[in-house]
Amino acid sequence: MIIGRRALLTSAAAAAALPLGARADDAPPDYTLHIAQGLVELAPEHIVSTTLYNGTFPGPLLRFKEGQRTVIDIHNDTDTPELVHWHGQTIPSDVDGAAEEGSPYVPPHGMQRVSFVPKPSGLRFYHSHAPAGADLNRGNYTGQSGAVYIEPKDNPGAYDQEVFLVLKEFAPSFSHGGDMDMDVLAGTPLPALQAMGKAASAVASVKTPGYEVNYDLFSINGRMLGHGEPVRVRAGERVLFHIVNTSATEIRSLALPGHVFRVIALDGNPVPTQATVPVLWLGTAERISAIVEMRHPGVWVMGDLADDDRKRGMGIVVEYAGQKGKPVWIKPKPFHWDYAAFGKPGTTPATPDETIEITVVKRNAAAGGFNQWTLNGESFSMDAMKPMLTLHQGRRYRLKFRNGSDDIHPLHLHRHSFELTQIGGKGTAGVIKDVVMLGGYQEAAFDFTADNPGPTLFHCHQQVHMDFGFAALFGYG
Ligand SMILES: [Cu+2]
């Protein structure tokens, strides 16, 4: 034991002597993750079995320091290969945790050590990037996700309490048709794109859309509404909520009756305008950091606007000190989510070096009963791994999306942050993200600088879209 401790001190001292960003390979890890089957007690009568990190849902909150190299040991105690993706970080392809980019799988009953310099600062997360296809026990359908917080070099806001909320559904099943949130986003469907969707439907051999995923159980921080610890607050406090939507497929909303949210960061990145909103909307994999001033004492339900989902668990109780009684829910007025509200007013983004237009089309049930997705006519195949684009380092690209489907797509770019430049029929600037919801039959555009060489994956973060073609690989030339 003493020898072990001395060895540890020696390697820690050796690591400390290295220049910033470097680390000894034999140093102890900063974090260890074990991937294994386990149980989540969502409520006493609802205990689910799924794959977890370190036996808990959510996985442990990992706190990193911006610019300070971190080492993580990942043990895969399951019988299937796994991938841990460091979502929202600008790190090398080999440690990003995406097979399409060449990151190695963590073999069954094997171990992998990853090491990277965390960045950018703010709210990120980690999750399984294993393809799921028709297997509801794989990828993001499991409980493999947790929040990452990268401490900024300077602290961005005054608050009294910091609360992390990880949103997640359990007990998935396939069905024909699901609940579709058509009324979530600002902007209106474009007739040309509606016509394109109609035309694609007309030539499809199957007229009805393919399988969608539904869930029986909903939770925040692994507990159904009313079954976890409440968020305990005091009147006058400013509470900073860090919210992560770790759903495999769903768009989530959150409201807290009698209170408003001042959004300070989207996907971990500070916003130019800290707009105040009554409702938060988060596409799959999106994050919001928002401050709530506690000025309305009571016992409240902070919950999803969808009654069915909230009644089956999607919510958490917010309890003021000294207040008692049954938690109260009040349905808010309809509210459209408008990313441009958080942008820099009166500015237009710089003209990019190159603009690439990407048109999204849905082929009804064309992939064994699942909808097949094409980008500019091509459905991504993990067998071919054919890059769609060659990026040139230092160039700034604009990706302009045209959605020929009625579905909302949470578009995600790996290993780069992007700036929203068009959303909901408007131009915008200054909102930096790594996931953005593209509305049904709408257009959106974002700009990014090719500043992180290596294979880069782009995909829809809706698992059942990604797994059936909605992805593209970008290479650097
Ligand atoms: Cu999608």
Image (cartoon, rainbow, N blue to C red):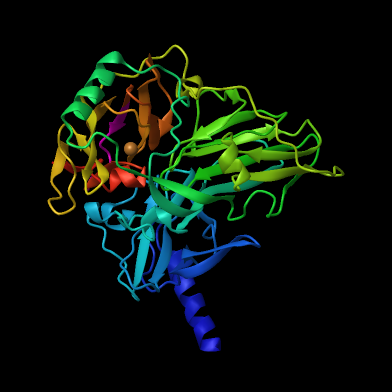
Residue found at x 55% / y 87%: 2
Query: What x and y, as percent, mark residue 333?
Result: 62, 22
For the N terminus, the image quarter is: bottom right
Looking at this view, name the residue that lies furthest to the top.
Answer: 346
Q: Relative to 130, is 142 on the left or the right?
A: right
Residue found at x 17% / y 43%: 475
The quarter of the picture where residue 79 lies is bottom left
Residue found at x 66% / y 62%: 44
Where in the image, quadrant-wise, is ligand 1 located?
top left
Query: What x and y, as percent, mark residue 474?
Result: 20, 41
Query: What x and y, as percent, mark residue 268?
Result: 49, 39
Q: Is residue 452 magenta?
A: yes
Marks counted in the figure total: 0
- Magenta extent: 446-454
Residue found at x 50% / y 25%: 337
Q: Relative to 375, is 13 on the left or the right?
A: right
